[in-house]
Structure formats: structure tokens, C-alpha cells
Amino acid sequence: MAEAPAPTLPELEAALARMVQERYPHAESDDEAELQAMAARDCEYLLTRIRILEAELVEANDEVKWIAPGHRSSPAQALKRIKALCTRFPDLFQSMLVVTVTHPAVAKEMLAPAIKQFRRDTDTLSSEDMSGLLVAISNGAQQAFEAVLRTRKNAERKGSGGGGVSWVKD
């Protein structure tokens, strides 16, 4: 006999909400409902709550899987993240850099209008201008990284490897 698939987080949350509505309708908050469930030794409620916490932990561990090489997101998912990044980073350069780095598989020609959509400070720039800036950010960062790496590989080392930072080991 095949084992039933584990319920999803939204299914668990819906089940818990039904239990609260049926068993603890006078609770004024989730915390109060939980206290009432503990006092009543409501094992089904408490087990559902534990499963929700476990599902949230799994979801938190998978929170950045979208940034992994080769991961394919839907355009809606990518737009949601790009909007969040553009909002979180008020500086245009920083927001473009973060979007570029976190969406390496997306063509710059596709990132440009997405960023423009969420940044009012790009209104005077065309999509082609934005694409050019994204390419410049990517290429400039790559070239700078390689230049520093070359000089560090060939440089003679002096002092400790931590550069005066006590928590860095050689």
C-alpha cells in the first residue's frame, strides 16, 4: 500500500485554522489558542503545530535555492524577487549589482525592463541603456575580480593571512 504524501505547509495551516475555529473559537490570538490546546492536551492540534514548524524549517532551508546555478524560476517568481531587491537597495548601482548577481542565468535584456519597472530613477534610461549598464556591471566586476586574483596569486605574502583580523585563520 502506497504511503500518502505529506501535507504541504498551506494544507497544514488550513487544518490548524479549522481546528482553532472549531475547538477554540473564543481565543483572541493564535498564542491563546495554543495555550488552550496545551491545557486541553489536544494532541492533534499540537502535532499539527509541530508539523507546521517543521515545514517552515524545511522551507527556510530552501529559501535561497532559486539562486543556485541552473535553477529555473517562473517569470512571476523572478519579478517578485527583483521587485524586493530593487526596493531593499535604494542605490541604483547596488540594486542592479544584486539583481545581476542573483539572476546570472537571466539575459541582461530581460533584466533591464524588469528593473526599470521597479525603479523610478531609471525613467530617463532606455531598456538598451539599462542592458548596457548591466553588462558593464557584470564585465567590470569579473575583470576587477580577475585582476585582483592575479595580483594576489603573484604577490609575496607578508604577515598573517588574516590581515589583522583576529578571527581569520591562515
Image (cartoon, helix red, strand yellow):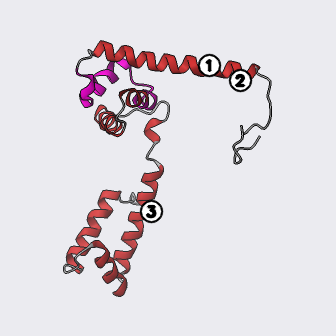
Relative to 61, 6 lies left or right: left
- Look at label 3 and name its amino acid: Glu
Residue at image mark 3: 54
Residue at image mark 1: 146
Residue at horizontal 79 percent and vertical 28 percent from the top? 157
Inspect the magenta stretch and tell me whether residue 107 lies in it.
Answer: yes
How many residues crowd around disc 3 within 10 Å: few (fewer than 14), some, or many (20 or more)? few
- Look at label 2 and name its amino acid: Arg
Q: Which residues are magenta?
A: 98-123
Percent x, y of residue 7 = 36, 60
Residue at image mark 2: 152
Dot 2 or dot 1: first in sequence order is: 1
Mark 2 or mark 3, whichever is nearer to me: 2
Relative to 54, 9 lies left or right: left
Q: Callout 2: helix, strand or loop?
A: helix
Quadrant housing the N terminus: bottom left
Dot 1 or dot 3: first in sequence order is: 3
Q: Callout 1: helix, strand or loop?
A: helix
Residue at horizontal 49 percent and vertical 16 percent from the top? 139
**Would you say residue 71 is visible in this rendering?**
yes
Residue at horizontal 72 percent and vertical 39 percent from the top? 162
How many residues crowd around disc 1 within 10 Å: few (fewer than 14), some, or many (20 or more)? few
Quadrant housing the C terminus: top right
Relative to 58, 111 lies left or right: left
Dot 2 or dot 3: first in sequence order is: 3
